[in-house]
Image: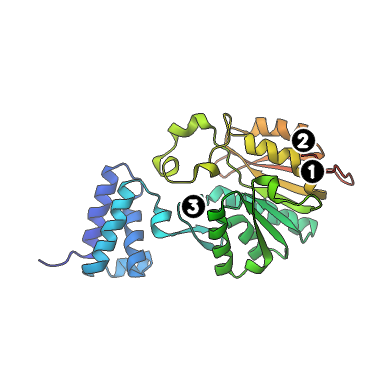
Amino acid sequence: MAAETALELTRKAAAHMADRGIENARLEAELMLGSILGLNRLQLYMQFDRPIDGAQLEQFRSMVRRRLKREPLQYILGEAHFRTLRLHVDPRVLIPRPETELLVEQVLEFLRLEQRAGPVLDLGTGSGAIAISVAMESAVEQIVATDLSADALAVARDNAQRAGVVERIEFRRGSLWQAVRAAERFDVIVSNPPYIAERERDELQPEVRDWEPGQALFSGADGLNAVREIVAGAAARLNAGGLLAIEIGADQGAAVLELLECGPGLAEYRIEKDLAGRDRIALARATLGVDYGNVV
């Protein structure tokens, strides 16, 4: 029996995945097969008549079985694209989202307009997407990246090594402010913290709910526990006029603005929307010329 061609395999796999409710099934089938063959999509199209058998066929079938169990495509491929980066990702870390690229853009714009060179603090670094992007796209020489998970820090450090910026990032383990020294001050504090409410767990897609690390997703009954802690302690760790930038949920803008208004030592607070017009980034500045000490 002749081996199936690349075209036949992708069509068959896409049909199976589409039947299970997986969107963009044809695209995903092509990406999985292309990763095995070492081809991009255009190269794969040009070799659609290529027979696939043996170890490559078994590897592809294994990938499809994993996807049918709703494991995220990025974990199966072992990588996610973020700005200029190709980051390694696996179930130890959250998969970077396009919305977080906007968070990075706000940080880079602040550094550029204010002509600041850091240091920068990335709270809850996960895969390292934010810290590595800042290192790659700015002149900042000192970046501190923290995470509660030792596994996440291992992934982030590996990604920084592969990007060639590991010498500029100090990785520390700890929950939010626990990893920050009392005397440290930063020009920017940035965070993509957990911000999903526990009550929303069952509403999430299985790729998120069943596969991504829960401690990077959920933050109390209203999803704002981590944001509250960050806001309460930010001014004490920011240089005068420094920036606080936090990614938030699409329905959390009003609540987070209220937190920022009550936050000690913060001013010029605002909410920026994502490309879909949803609340996504909370921004504030440390009050100029005032030292608020170590408030939490």
The residues tagged by marks 1 and 2 sit, at their Cα atoms, a distance apart of 8 Å
Q: How many marks?
A: 3
Label 3 – label 1 distance at C-alpha: 31 Å
Q: Amino acid at mark 1?
A: Ala
Comes first in the chain, label 1 or label 2? 1
Residue at 58% across, 32% down? 220
For image coordinates 61% across by 33% down, the residue present is: 252
Q: Amino acid at mark 2?
A: Gly
Q: Which quarter shows the N terminus?
A: bottom left
Q: Could you classify mark 3 by the number of other residues whose Cα lies within 10 Å: few (under 14), some (14-19), or many (20 or more)?
A: many
Visible residue check, residue 230:
yes
In this view, 234 is above or below 133? above
Q: Is residue 14 above or below residue 33?
A: above
Q: Secondary structure at mark 2?
A: loop
**Front residue of 49 and 53:** 53
| Contact? badges 1 and 2 (CB < 8 Å) | yes
Residue assigned mark 3: 92
Question: Which image quarter holds the C terminus?
Answer: top right
- Amino acid type at image mark 3: Arg
Q: Which residue bears the numbered disc 2?
A: 263
Q: Which residue is mark 1?
A: 235
- Residue 43 screen position, x and y as percent: 35, 69
Q: Quadrant of residue 169?
A: bottom right
Mark 2, other Cα within 10 Å: few <14 / some 14–19 / many ≥20: some
Foreground label between 3 and 1: 3
At numbered mark 3, what does the secondary structure look like: helix, strand or loop? Answer: loop
